[in-house]
Amino acid sequence: MSPVLVTRREGAVLVLSNNNVAARNALSLAFYAAVTDALRDAACDASVGAIVLTGEGGHFCSGGDLRQLAKRRDLSVQERRVRLEGLHDLIRAVRDCPKPVIAAVEGAAAGAGLSLAMACDMLVAAKDAKFTVAYVKVGLTPDGGATAFLAEFVSRQVLTELCLTGAALSGERMHALGAVNRLVESGHALSTAIELAAEISTGPQHAMSRIKTLCHQAMRNSLGDQLELEAQFMVEAMGTDESKEGIEAFLSKRSPNYTQLRQASE
């Protein structure tokens, strides 16, 4: 049987690829567990500098498997909640991973697939990719943080329209809204995401982890709370080997070597 998750390394970049091609990479409990485990292992692996999340066969993810969701009618509310939390645990794992996670989206990113893509720290998408809040078409409501992530980019009125109509947004439209970092021709999302991840992977890992946290909190914190968090992180960063290397490299007019620091800590 083929694995639900295909993994490979591109130097310091870990590529995680959804491998449910027959169902356009619909989600499963096994996939939730596999990605969550891979992210946890990557967080502890100093040789991993960044992560790319993508899908095999030309689609990122078509969302939940409706055949499996239909079976949950026979479960209690509590049992349904347990299964739903597998998805939400995955979303939290992506957001909480200390390493940058970049989505490479081709084809469909529908329902929870949209949520998963937007949970990533950055997003590379093909121009003709289709992002869809598809739940209403099958009598369901959004999950996986879809409404929270979209609300960062669109007004309440637009968000409501997207959720009530299930209308698709192209990669071009998502880029115009500011939700996509790199817009590429069809077939080039993965290679571009790997290039971006490779560039980022050479940076100072501890500083980047703190920066990721700051960026996540910035939309939710008051100015006072954000200033406090920035102050905590800055005074901590001043005492690290990373800042020592970065400042010395700048003053010496050379490139910093953060990779060497990571290797020395292994």
Image (tube, rainbow, N blue to C red):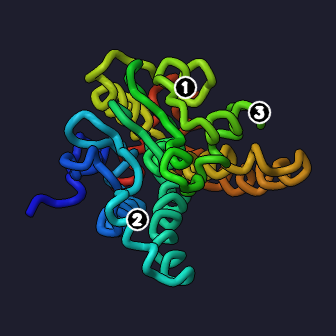
Q: Toward which corner of the image does residue 11 lie, by quadrant?
A: top left
Q: CA distance from mark 1 to mark 2?
A: 28 Å
Q: Percent position (x, y) of residue 241? A: 54, 52
Q: Residues within 10 Å of mark 1 (few under 14, many from 20)?
A: many
Between marks 2 and 3, how big is the CA–CA gap?
29 Å
Q: Which residue is mark 3?
A: 157
Looking at the rendered structure, the secondary structure element under dot 2 is helix
- Disc 2 residue type (three-letter): Leu
Q: Position of residue 43 (x, y in %)?
A: 42, 61
Residue 97 vertical placement versus 37 (above, below)? above
Density class for disc 3 (Cα within 10 Å; few <14, some 14-19, many ≥20) is few
Residue type (three-letter) at the residue carrying disc 3:
Gln
- Quadrant location of the N terminus? bottom left
Q: Quadrant of the C terminus?
A: bottom left
Residue drawn at x 39%, y 66% is 70
Proximity of marks 3 and 1: CB atoms separated by less than 8 Å? no
The image position of residue 46, as x and y in percent, is: 36, 57
Residue at image point 38% right, 18% down = 184
Residue beneath the point at 49% across and 37% down? 132
Residue identifier under label 1: 174
Mark 2 is surrounded, within 10 Å at the Cα level, by few (under 14), some (14 to 19) or many (20 or more) other residues, namely: few
